[in-house]
Image (cartoon, rainbow, N blue to C red):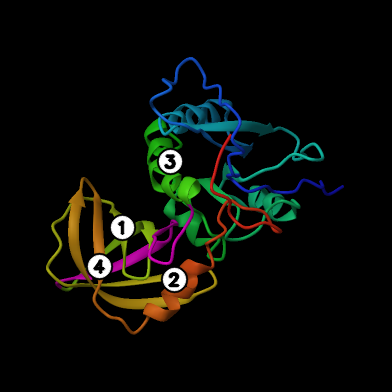
Amino acid sequence: MKDRCQSKPLTSQLQGAAIKLPDSVHPDESLFRAQFTLAGFKVSRKLLDSFVDGFRRFNVDVRLIHVQNGKLENGVHVNACALPLNGHAISWLRKTSWYSPRRTVIYAVGNTKRLNDFPDLAVNALLQTGTISDVLAAIDATQPILVRGISESARVPIAVPVAIKADGKSLIAITKNVGYGGMAVKLHRMPTLPETITVTFSLPEAGSFFLAAVPRWYSGRFVGLQFRSLKEESSLKEWVKSYSSLGSSHHQGRGAAYA
């Protein structure tokens, strides 16, 4: 039987009551702590615990639900889900009552090739090996948006393949985030890109894009790209806007905070 869980905003307004922080958090570090619930399906407890430890660095408390049999208790609120990128897990996710595209945060474990098998699934962060470094990268990509929400000028954390043409050569990358003005991508190796390149990619519910771009920064294998063409700006703005409720429920807008 389909569970009747409802998702809940990732954050909720502080109601003015005194806040008791854990002993590990100094009162001067923050006046509040964000909280959300992460469900893990067919992934290890160790992986889920890594999310808890990683988010704690940003003063965010994660409540874990390790789903063993595919069912959740009634009344459980879920904001994000970690699961393997395969047909069984994705089918389970889509049957849950709390899952909603562009609202539920998805951490998927799998490789780029598996990502291509689910082009309409908005994976917010791809964990290609499931290691701690993967988890930390996923947290780095998503935590600013989860805590503060998405404005029109923000970058949406999302993992989609990108084909890059540079001086007649082809490269494949994975996006870390996408906005109407540019994107951050992770390359499979660390080449220096020319001043102008072209990028081809598809976004869930938005179709394909072919744009000229300029590299603006490098950090290891990550590169920040600024789009040069404005012809797709309105379409990308609408797409970013559709993610304004990432982490919130079907019935409520994003709150601003905390517990």
Q: Residues within 10 Å of mark 3 (few under 14, many from 20)?
A: some
Point out the tag, 2 or 1, that comes first from the N-terminus: 1
Front-most of residues 88 and 3: 3
Q: Is residue 39 above or below residue 146?
A: above
Residue 8 in the image: x percent, y percent?
Answer: 67, 47
In the image, what residue occupies the spot 71% across and 32% down?
A: 68
Q: Give the mark nearest the N terminus, 1 or 3.
A: 3
Judge left or right: residue 5 versus residue 84: right
CA–CA distance in space, label 2 to label 3 = 23 Å
Which residue ends up furthest to the front in the rendered image? Answer: 16
Residue 184 placement (x, y as % from top left): 31, 57
In this view, the residue in front, 23 or 144, is: 23
Q: Which residue is mark 1?
A: 184
Q: Nearer the viewer, mark 2 or mark 3?
A: 3
Residue ID at (54%, 67%): 242
In the image, what residue occupies the spot 80% across and 36% down? Answer: 73
Residue under pointer 3: 139
